[in-house]
Image (spheres, rainbow, N blue to C red):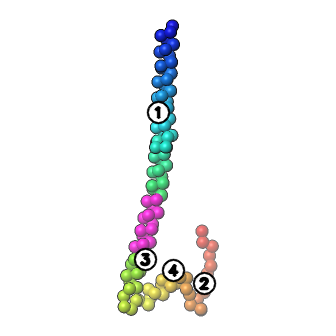
Amino acid sequence: MKRDLQFFIVALCCIGLVLSFVHHTRFGRYGLEAQASLRKRLDLVTLRTSRLEAVRTTLLREIRLLETATPEPDLVEEIARTKLRYAYPDDRILVTNPR
């Protein structure tokens, strides 16, 4: 009888220990759930980085074009209109609701 009780207690402790490991493997700080969350965050950061790289490439191209002795007037006008939102006094401007 005493031996059966000891076996039962040891078995319960082992099961508890295994359940603890399983819980921490799944939900712990470095577990599977945390890895999935980090993967999603990595995807978002990668997407944002690629978008910023595209903007950087465009800006570097525009800088190279403007660094010449006499920059193209059309390029200067395009940049002034799109980036600085300049317009001629006789231009008609349509304001839309950007989303």
Give the spatial CA distance, label 2 vs label 1: 65 Å
Label number found at residue 34: none
Of labels 2 and 3, earlier in sequence is 3
Of labels 4 and 2, earlier in sequence is 4
Give the spatial CA distance, label 4 vs label 2: 15 Å
Q: Is residue 20 above or below residue 4?
A: below
**Nearer the observer, 94 or 28:** 28
Give the mark toward the camera: 2 or 3. 3
**Nearer the observer, 72 or 90:** 72
Of labels 2 and 1, earlier in sequence is 1
Three-letter amino acid code of the residue under disc 2? Ile
Three-letter amino acid code of the residue under disc 3? Leu
Q: Is residue 70 above or below residue 94?
A: below
User: Badge 1 is on which residue?
Assistant: 21
Question: Residue 91, located in which quarter of the rendered image?
Answer: bottom right
The structure residue drawn at horizontal position 50% and vertical position 35%, both measured from the top left corner, is 23
